[in-house]
Image (cartoon, grey):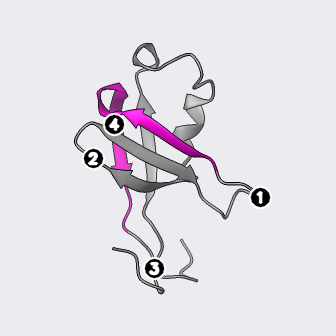
Amino acid sequence: MVTTSSTLPRVEVEVDPTKLSDNIVHYKELESKQYRLLLQTENRVWLFKSTDHVKGILSVVTLPKESLRVMTIERATPEGDNQ
């Protein structure tokens, strides 16, 4: 759960591109740690690019878990905490 003093955890994702649809063209960008984990279920994960790195509209990326090779999740950090 997110409180007013914390943010969603950062993630670094390595994917198997053969298991992704062709419309995910920048999948290498998911390894940048600029994404945060929004939601995770048994079969899918939803990520969005951190507002630290994006201006304007946020895009949510959804990936099937079977396409993930590795997903590293960093703990949520208090707001204003330098990383």
The amino acid pointed to by label 4 is Val
- The residue shown at (65%, 63%) is 51
Residue that mark 1 sits on: 56
Residue density around tag 3, few if under 14, some if 14–19, many if 20 or more, within 10 Å? some
Q: CA distance from mark 2 to mark 4?
A: 16 Å
Residue 41, numbered label: 2
Q: Horizontal placement of 55 versus 12: left or right?
A: right
The overriding secondary structure of the stretch rendered in magenta is strand
Q: Earlier in the sequence, mark 1 or mark 2?
A: 2
Q: Which residues are magenta?
A: 59-75
Residue under pointer 3:
6
- Residue 7: percent from left, percent from top: 48, 73
Q: Amino acid at mark 2?
A: Thr
Could you tell me which secondary element the residue under label 2 belongs to?
Answer: loop
Residue appearing at x 55%, y 51% in the figure:
48
The quarter of the picture where the N terminus appears is: bottom left
Q: Give the distance between the C-alpha atoms of the residues marked 4 and 3, in whole angstroms.
A: 24 Å
The answer to whether residue 7 is above or below residue 58 is below
- State the separation of the CA atoms marked 4 and 1: 29 Å
Residue name at image x 48 percent, y 86 percent: 4
Q: Which residue was labeled with disc 4?
A: 70
